[in-house]
């Protein structure tokens, strides 16, 4: 990357993997004790609230019995999560240099699951959930500080307590320098939708901070939404089993990722655009991530049609849902989505982000070349928008995009 010429490729949604000592080294042992997330080296498993939540040798064998794979093959599936670039900022830069990325915006892995939606009773405590995510926010800010012109991140939040969420958003942005806030595309308070006024003070706080709200999903049976409603994954406390055990009644990671993520994001987008949130907070930017993007043009078209048909339900909207989207929203596409270029024609190339998803299973080293090939039919300006300029605008990054040749 040349500071003089500007940047040309920015990963709009990459990931880190939280190190084993993140929470034990940062959370108050006297207050939370055994509730603190910890990694057991002997079991090779994460415990939260004293319950094994991720991995474990016994659980590995249980999964192997239910999926057509061997232990070695299953380890290969999770190999990328152990890449040094997932938890070491200097190693991450090496990966980015190899893959042709000038900068990256980072999201968590295990912290996607740590919130009051977790089935462990202790994590239903908003104060504990906030402390868990506060520790992550501190760590990711330090991670990015190693390469402040190339690594950026958002704060992970829970909305179970709006006062705590607003305070942490302000701390994360004003003190830690994080570029926005991330919440899950699922209701938090009594399963009330995001269009309910109970969340308005949070939206107002983030709008005042002039940073985006990113909706990022993850697959788990206890999340209010599609995974639980439609039994898309196995009902186990251990996330390894939840996401990988498959039987005639339940799905697994494939079904949860393909259907659960997209269903939850569809509902969230509809609540934001049709429920009046974008109307009430016109300066707030919304990002819809890791759910694919090809469905968005069709959904916006249908929302517009239905709002115009049932016009009495439009009394709190001053413009159409698609117009709110084009004014305030971005959606991320996977680099290889076949209709990415076509979608740019409907959504506008200035509304599309792209995501490497490193180091999760969807990632592959040729991600940037695949993306550029997929965009090659678009005009140069549209390609530059998607590759870097939109990421700069959406996240308010202190970077300059490379100018046209």
Image (tube, helix red, strand yellow):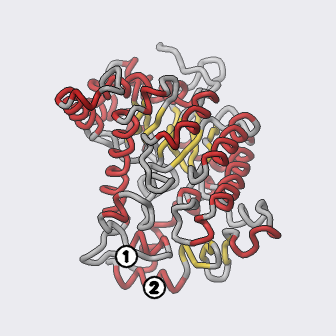
Q: Quadrant of the N terminus?
A: top right
At x 50%, y 75%, the residue is 238
- Callout 1: SS: loop
Residue 97 in sight: no
Comparing labels 2 and 1, the label whose residue is closer to the camera: 1
User: Image quarter for residue 273?
Assistant: top left
Q: Give the percent coordinates (x, y) of residue 374.
A: 32, 35
Q: Residue at x 40, y 81 (%)?
A: 64
Q: Residue 302 in the image: x percent, y percent?
A: 21, 34
On residue 87, which mark appears? none
The CA distance from mark 2 to mark 1 is 11 Å
Residue drawn at (20%, 33%) of the image: 306
Q: What is the crowding at mark 1: few (fewer than 14 residues within 10 Å), some, or many (at least 20)?
A: many
Q: Is residue 404 visible?
A: yes
**Direction left: furthest residue:** 309
Q: Residues within 10 Å of mark 2 (few under 14, many from 20)?
A: few
Q: Is residue 45 above or below residue 22?
A: below
Residue 387 figure quarter:
top left
Residue farthest toward the right in the current orientation of the protein: 30
Label 2 secondary element = helix
Q: Return the x and y of residue 298 as percentages of the image width and height.
A: 23, 36
Residue 90 falls left or right of residue 325: right
Front-most of 145 and 325?
325
Q: Provide the residue designation for mark 2.
A: 61
> What residue is disc 1 on?
245
Foreground residue, 77 or 259? 259
Horizontal relation, residue 81 to residue 20: left or right: left
Q: Position of residue 343 (x, y in %)?
A: 28, 31
Please report the residue visible at 56 percent of the width from the left and 61 percent of the height from the top.
Answer: 116
Image side of residue 43 versus residue 268, left or right:
right
């Amino acid at each position: 990357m040349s500071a003089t010429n500007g940047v040309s490729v920015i990963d709009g949604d990459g990931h880190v993997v939280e190190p084993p000592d993140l929470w034990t080294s940062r959370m108050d042992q006297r207050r939370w004790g055994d509730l603190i997330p910890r990694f057991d080296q002997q079991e090779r498993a994460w415990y939260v609230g004293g319950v094994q939540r991720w991995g474990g040798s016994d659980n590995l064998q249980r999964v192997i019995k239910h999926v057509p794979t061997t232990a070695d093959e299953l380890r290969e599936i999770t190999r990328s999560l152990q890449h040094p670039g997932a938890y070491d900022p200097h190693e991450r830069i090496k990966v980015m240099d190899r893959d042709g990325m000038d900068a990256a915006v980072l999201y968590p892995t295990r912290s996607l699951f740590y919130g009051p939606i977790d089935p462990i009773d202790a994590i239903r405590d908003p104060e504990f959930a906030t402390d868990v995510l506060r520790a992550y926010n501190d760590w990711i800010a330090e991670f990015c500080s190693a390469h402040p012109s190339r690594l950026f991140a958002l704060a992970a939040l829970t909305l179970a307590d709006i006062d705590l969420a607003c305070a942490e958003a302000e701390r994360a942005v004003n003190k830690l320098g994080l570029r926005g806030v991330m919440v899950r595309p699922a209701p938090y308070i009594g399963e009330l939708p995001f269009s309910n006024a109970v969340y308005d003070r949070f939206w107002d706080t983030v709008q005042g901070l002039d940073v985006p709200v990113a909706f990022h999903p993850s697959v788990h049976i206890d999340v209010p939404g599609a995974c639980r409603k439609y039994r898309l994954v196995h009902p186990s406390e251990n996330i390894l089993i939840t996401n990988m055990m498959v039987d005639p009644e339940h799905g697994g990671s494939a079904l949860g990722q393909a259907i659960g993520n997209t269903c939850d994001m569809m509902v969230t987008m509809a609540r934001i655009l049709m429920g009046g949130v974008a109307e009430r907070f016109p300066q707030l930017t919304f990002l819809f991530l890791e759910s694919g993007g090809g469905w968005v043009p069709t959904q916006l078209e249908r929302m517009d049609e239905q709002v115009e048909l049932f016009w009495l339900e439009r009394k709190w909207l001053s413009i159409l849902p698609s117009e709110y989207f084009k004014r305030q929203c971005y959606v991320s596409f996977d680099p290889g989505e076949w209709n990415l270029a076509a979608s740019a024609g409907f959504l506008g190339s200035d509304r599309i982000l792209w995501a490497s998803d490193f180091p999760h299973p969807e990632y592959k080293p040729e991600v940037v070349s695949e993306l550029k090939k997929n965009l090659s039919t678009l005009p140069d300006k549209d390609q530059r928008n998607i590759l870097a300029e939109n990421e700069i605008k959406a996240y308010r990054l202190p970077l300059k995009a490379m100018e046209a040749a």
